[in-house]
Amino acid sequence: MADFLDRLGAAVAARVNGQREIMTSPAVLRWVREGKVYSGGQGLEATDILGVDTEADTTPSVVLASPASADTLIVPLQAKMAITVAGTGLNKLDVSFTKAAAEVATALALSSGTPLNIQNHITLNPMKTGLATLERNVTATALLTTDYITLAHDHAVASSLTSGLPLPGAGLEKVVNLFKPAPIMLIEGAALMVHLSGAATAGNWAVTVTWAELTDEDLY
C-alpha cells in the first residue's frame, strides 16, 4: 500500500481491514495521539473545591479559559463534578459558556483564581503544554446575561451522602458530555464556567474538565 501523509506531514502506510478498506480512527483519538487533549483537576491530596453559598454568575467555582489568540480552538469534551462534603440544603451545579471577547461590549475579566493541575492525555517526553488555563474559585467581572448561556444544570442534596438518593436524578457525581450533540468551541478569551453552590452553606466538590486544543486544520 502506498504511503500516505499523516496529520503531521510524515509519510505512513495506510491501515487496512480484511476487505482492504482504509481504516481511520475517531477524531478524538487522533487528537490524543497528537498531544492535543488535556484534563485538569485536583490531586488526591489537594483540598476539594469549595462552592459558594450564594449563587452568582460572577463567582464561578471553576473556569476553563481559552487564550486571547484566534489561532487556538478550545473544544470542551467533558466536565465531571463530584460532591465530597455536602453543604446544607440543595447543592446546585451549572455549566455555562461565554462568548469571545470580540463579541461583547466589555470582555469577561477573570481574577484571583488558583490554577488546577493539567495533564496531557499522552505521556510523550517532553509532554506538550497546553495554552488554555484552568482555575478554581475565580472572580469574574463584566459578565452580562446576554454574553453567556447555561448549558447544563443539576443538583445534589445534602442527605445524598448518607441516605441514598432522595431526589430523582440527584447523586454524588455528575458527568456533563460537552462534545455531543455539537461542541461549543472557545476562542479569543471565551470560557467554560462551572458554578457550584449551596442553598444555605456551600459544599465541597472534586472537579475534572477534559478538553482539546485545536487549530482549524484539525477539523477537516
Image (spheres, rainbow, N blue to C red):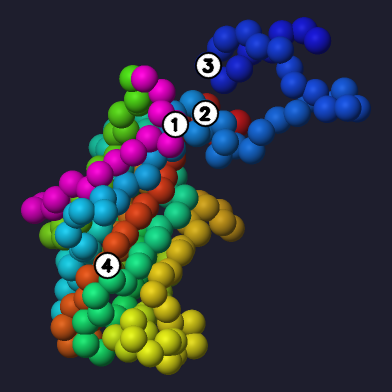
Above or below residue 102? Residue 88 is below
| Residue 56 seen in render | no
- The residue that disc 3 covers is 8
Neighbour tally class for label 2: few under 14, some 14-19, many 20 plus, Cα within 10 Å: some
Q: Which amino acid does the dot numbered 2 rest on?
A: Arg
- The residue that disc 2 covers is 33
User: Which residue is more in the foreground, 105 or 172?
Assistant: 172
Which residue is depicted at the point 45% across and 64% down?
175
User: Is 12 on the left-hand or right-hand side of 209?
Assistant: right
Above or below residue 165? Residue 118 is above
Which percent across, then down, holds residue 80? 40, 61
Q: Are marks 1 and 2 in contact (CB under 8 Å)?
A: yes
Neighbour tally class for label 4: few under 14, some 14-19, many 20 plus, Cα within 10 Å: many
Sequence-first tag of 3 and 2 = 3
Neighbour tally class for label 3: few under 14, some 14-19, many 20 plus, Cα within 10 Å: few
Task: Report the span colored magenta.
Answer: 101-125
- The residue that disc 1 covers is 122
The mark lying in front, picked from 4 and 3, is: 4
Q: Which amino acid does the dot numbered 4 rest on?
A: Trp
User: Which residue is more in the foreground, 82 or 164?
Assistant: 164
Q: Which amino acid does the dot numbered 1 rest on?
A: Ile
Distance between the Cα atoms at labels 1 and 2? 7 Å
**Residue 103 among magenta residues:** yes
Distance between the Cα atoms at labels 3 and 2? 11 Å
Sequence-first tag of 2 and 4 = 2
Distance between the Cα atoms at labels 4 and 1? 26 Å
Sequence-first tag of 4 and 3 = 3
Q: Which amino acid does the dot numbered 3 rest on?
A: Leu
